[in-house]
Image (cartoon, helix red, strand yellow):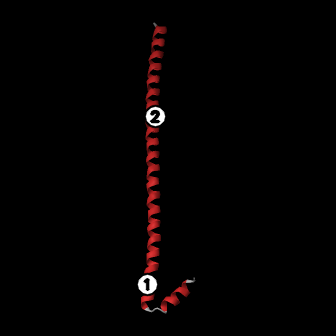
Amino acid sequence: MEPINIMSQLASLGAAGIMGALWLMERRLSRQREQQLTESHERIIRDEQRLDKLTRVVEHNSAAMTKFAENQREQTEVLRHLLEELHHERTS
């Protein structure tokens, strides 16, 4: 039924009919808004969980890169020492 027809029928009931119709519309809109808020909240929670996982992955990757860089420095030092020893033996 068209909203205009509904309103004209309710208008025939007087002010109480109009007030009742407005109350019903307000309740329906409130339920819709509550549903939207619930869905938004659920999406925010899901996004927060995804971001938490992503943050953990980035932290693990950063730790792995740091360990890799430390290992590379250690290997460089070992090779430098080895080259110094070889060079020292040749010049002795």
Q: Amino acid at mark 1?
A: Gly
* First-in-chain label (1 vs 2): 1
Residue at x 46% of width, y 15% of height: 82
Q: Quadrant of residue 15?
A: bottom left
Give the position of the C terminus as an image quadrant.
Answer: top left
Q: Are marks 1 and 2 in contact (CB under 8 Å)?
A: no
Specify few, some or many for label 1: CA neighbours under 10 Å numbering under 14, 14-19, or 20 or more: few
Q: Circle 2 is placed at which residue position? A: 64
Pair 1/2: label in front:
1
Q: Quadrant of residue 27?
A: bottom left
Q: CA distance from mark 1 to mark 2?
A: 66 Å
Tag 2's secondary structure?
A: helix
Q: Amino acid at mark 2?
A: Ala
Placement of 76 over or under 5, stated as above or below: above
Residue at x 45% of width, y 79% of height: 24
User: Going by the picture, which residue comes out furthest to the right?
Assistant: 1
Placement of 90 over or under 74, stated as above or below: above
Q: Position of residue 13 (x, y in %)?
A: 46, 91
| Dot label at residue 20 | 1
Residue at x 49% of width, y 8% of height: 90
